[in-house]
Structure formats: structure tokens, C-alpha cells
Image (tube, rainbow, N blue to C red):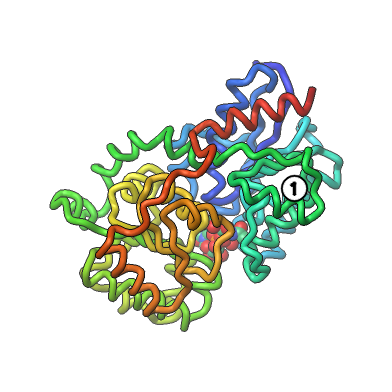
């Protein structure tokens, strides 16, 4: 058993898994730390949203699964807090490390600091300045209570300073999600050959060009009028380029509830269940462009050099627009299609990979954390 500083790491939802994988590895590889303790809150519980990520990314089985499941934000956050507290009492780690901006991040962060455990936040300082986004609330609150804040892009530090967080606590280390991307790209290109539905295999076998799409933000899918408009834009685009659309359970449910299945039920739209990390990455890397409202995909497409059309009014990841391949288009159908046509005609933005997105963010985090304890 490796002796050293014990860090309790928290994951809850799909976008956390690819961030925690390199951090766990870096803590294991660093002489100062003991084996990290992993808590999964169970915010995401479907096999398609969870299991294959652990397996594909070599994340150890969580030491504890809080099994909170779905609920309103209040119920989900409260359940995580209630169930996390006894684990913390039992494990008594040297610090708690949370990633990203999901409900699990803020819930476990709050419990930790109230019990005076140091809190480490990875992916600090991102801001959309849109308080209607649940993730923005989670980001602002988690950053306020964190002791060590690790940022992915230069601009994040200024956001934190503006909010009164002292400079010594902030460290620009790069992007752990891109560590995972580089570590897995070769395997992803192989995995894609085996990918699920026959329709996807047929597209790949014919070496046909295609686009990818993902959609799950509450502001896009919970309102039937917006949802219909976005689906309609994708449907129209799919008449020129087939679209592979791995569908989040939330979006699937909303499409059924709103009676919009007919829009996606057509030949150019290949709708699948959520894909594994490797399949998704491999498909993105081979695609002509990606439509999304996800945060992480804006960064992954920038690292891959694939044009990204972000169907949101804003982004908390401006480096992907300023330096990368991302264009934030909003939710207007005509605007989405105009940018789509432009990408087809010109190949889209070329972009470059942002500073410190070099695959080594997690070892930097381990080293700075070790020094902080000393
Ligand atoms: C969460 C994160 C979001 C992240 C997204 C990625 C918050 C506030 N949001 O949003 O930042 O981009 O994950 O996926 O934490 N559901 C299932 N099976 C699951 C999980 C969810 O069926 O395994 C359904 C449930 O009906 C649930 C709905 O999806 O009510 C929403 O799930 P939830 O975890 O609340 O938020 P996400 O929309 O997934």
C-alpha cells in the first residue's frame, strides 16, 4: 500500500470521468501521495453514461458510490451532501479534489470546506457570465470556497482575481481533458472501426463524410420551441451531410415528450444511444465538423482541429473561439445553417492548440499540490 498524502477525488457525471482519469494516474505516479480515494456520487447512473468510461479510461472502481441518481437540482445536491458527509468523516483525507462544474462538484465542495478539509478545484475560473446556466452557479460557488484552483486557460485567472480570489491560490496548468484525449487518440481511432450501429459502420466503410451532433443543455432541450428549431436546423444540414447524433437521455426524453420524433426520424440523421469515450473521440476525429452545446466538446474539437459549431449564446471557454476551431452561433436556425454552409465551403476555422494543452496538466497538478502540502 502506497504511503503518503491522501486525496479524496470526486466524480459524478459523464464529463467528470475523462478529467479524473489522468489526475488519478498522476497522483499514483507521484511519490508524495497515497492511493487516491475515489467517490462516485452516482449523478449519472445509466450504463451508457458511466460504465464504459471507467473501463475505457482505466479509472479504478470507485471506493464508494453514493447512488444519488436524478432529481431536481435541490434534491440532487442535497442528497449528494447528505450521503457524502459520512464518507468524509470516515476517510478523513488530507484534501478533497473536485473537477468541472456539475452538481456533484459544488455539493461535495461545500460539505468539505464546512468540515475544514482543503478543497482543490480543477477547471477553475471558467465563466459564461450567464447565471441561468446551472453550471455557472456551480463554477462561481466552487471557486469561492476552494483553496487551490487549477485553470485551463490564461483568461480564467483574471475572472478569479475579479471575484476576490488571491493570486497565490491560482495555478494555470492546462487542460486535463486534453491529457486524456492525447493519451487515448490512437486507441480511439481503432475503436471507431468497431463502433455500434450498422448505419455508422456503413458511413465509415464507404469513407463517406459526416458531421457529429450532441445536444443536452437544459436551455436548449427543455423548451419545446427551441428544441424544435435546433432539430430542424440539424435536419436541414443532414440533407447535405449525414449527421451522427449520440443522444443524451435527457434529450431523448424531451424529444418524445414534445412529439418531435418525426424530425430526427429520417435517413441522414443517425441517432444512437450515448457512445463510449473512445467511440465518440474517434468519430469526432474523423468527422467534417461537430454541432454541440457541450462544454467539453468545444475543447476537444479545438485540440483535434475539427470545426465546431456551438449552438449556445455564449461560451465559458473563450480560448476555443479566440485560438481554436469553435464558432458560437446561438440557436437561430438560419445562423446555424449559414455557418454550416461556410464550413462546408471553406473548411472552417483552422485554429491552434491553446497554451499548455500538451497532455501534461495532471502531472503539474500533482506536483503543485505536493508542494502546497509541504
Ligand atoms: C449534467 C451536468 C452538465 C453536463 C452533463 C453531461 C449538472 C448541473 N449538469 O447534466 O454540466 O454537461 O451532465 O452529461 O450537473 N439521466 C439518465 N441517466 C443518467 C443521467 C441522467 O437518464 O445516467 C436523465 C435523467 O432523466 C435526468 C436527466 O437525464 O433527470 C438530467 O440529468 P442530470 O444529471 O440532472 O443533468 P445532465 O443534463 O446530465
Instruction: For mark 1, give the secondary structure.
Output: helix
State ligand 1's quadrant: bottom right
**Res 337 visible:** yes
Q: Would you place residue 83 above or below residue 21 in this image?
A: below
Quadrant placement of the N terminus: top right
Q: Which residue is found at the position 78% from the left and 56% from the top?
A: 163
Q: Position of residue 87 (x, y in %)?
A: 75, 39
Front-most of 60 and 226? 226
Location of residue 322 in the rendering, given as x and y in whole percent from the top left corner? 50, 55
Q: Camera-side residue: 5 or 158?
A: 158
Q: Residues within 10 Å of mark 1 (few under 14, many from 20)?
A: many
Quick one: quadrant of the C terminus? top right
Up the image or down, 315 lies above or below 324; here it is: below
Left/right placement of residue 291 relative to residue 158 reads left
- Judge by depth and name the residue closer to the eye, 328 or 87: 328
The answer to whether residue 277 is left or right of residue 222 is: left
Rendering quarter of residue 3 = top right
> Which residue is under mark 1?
109
Count up the numbered dots.
Answer: 1
Amino acid at each position: 500500500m502506497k504511503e503518503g498524502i491522501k486525496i479524496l477525488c470526486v466524480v459524478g457525471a459523464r464529463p467528470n470521468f475523462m478529467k479524473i482519469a489522468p489526475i488519478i494516474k498522476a497522483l499514483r505516479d507521484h511519490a508524495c501521495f497515497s492511493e487516491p480515494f475515489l467517490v462516485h456520487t452516482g449523478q449519472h447512473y445509466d450504463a451508457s453514461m458511466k460504465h464504459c468510461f471507467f473501463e475505457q479510461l482505466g479509472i479504478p472502481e470507485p471506493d464508494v458510490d453514493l447512488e444519488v441518481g436524478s432529481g431536481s437540482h435541490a434534491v440532487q445536491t442535497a442528497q449528494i451532501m447528505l450521503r457524502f458527509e459520512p464518507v468524509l468523516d470516515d476517510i478523513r483525507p488530507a484534501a478533497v479534489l473536485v473537477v468541472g462544474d456539475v452538481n456533484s462538484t459544488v455539493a461535495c465542495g461545500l460539505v468539505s470546506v464546512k468540515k475544514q478539509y482543503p478543497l482543490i478545484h480543477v477547471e477553475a475560473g471558467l465563466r459564461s457570465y450567464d447565471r441561468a446556466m446551472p453550471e455557472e452557479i456551480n463554477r462561481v460557488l466552487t471557486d469561492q470556497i476552494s483553496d487551490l484552483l487549477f485553470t485551463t486557460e490564461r483568461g480564467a485567472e483574471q475572472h478569479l482575481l475579479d471575484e476576490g480570489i488571491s493570486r497565490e491560490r491560482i495555478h494555470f496548468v492546462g487542460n486535463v481533458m486534453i491529457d486524456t484525449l492525447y493519451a487515448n487518440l490512437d486507441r480511439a481511432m481503432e475503436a471507431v472501426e468497431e463502433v455500434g450501429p450498422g448505419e455508422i459502420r456503413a458511413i465509415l466503410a464507404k469513407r463517406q463524410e459526416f458531421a457529429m451532433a450532441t445536444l443536452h443543455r437544459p436551455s436548449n432541450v427543455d423548451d419545446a420551441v427551441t428544441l424544435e428549431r435546433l432539430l430542424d436546423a440539424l435536419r436541414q444540414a443532414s440533407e447535405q451531410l449525414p449527421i451522427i447524433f449520440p443522444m443524451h437521455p435527457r434529450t431523448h426524453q424531451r424529444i418524445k415528450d414534445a412529439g418531435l420524433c418525426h424530425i430526427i426520424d429520417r435517413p441522414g440523421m443517425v441517432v444512437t444511444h450515448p457512445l463510449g469515450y473512445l467511440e465518440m473521440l474517434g468519430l469526432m476525429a474523423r468527422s467534417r465538423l461537430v454541432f454541440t452545446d457541450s462544454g467539453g466538446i468545444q475543447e476537444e474539437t479545438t485540440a483535434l482541429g475539427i470545426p465546431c459549431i456551438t449552438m449556445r449564446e455564449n461560451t465559458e471557454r473563450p480560448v476555443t473561439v479566440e485560438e481554436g476551431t469553435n464558432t458560437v452561433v446561438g440557436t437561430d436556425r438560419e445562423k446555424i445553417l449559414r455557418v454550416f454552409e461556410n464550413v462546408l465551403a471553406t473548411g472552417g476555422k483552422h485554429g491552434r492548440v491553446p497554451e499548455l494543452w500538451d497532455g501534461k496538466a495532471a502531472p503539474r497538478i500533482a506536483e503543485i499540490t505536493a508542494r502546497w502540502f509541504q
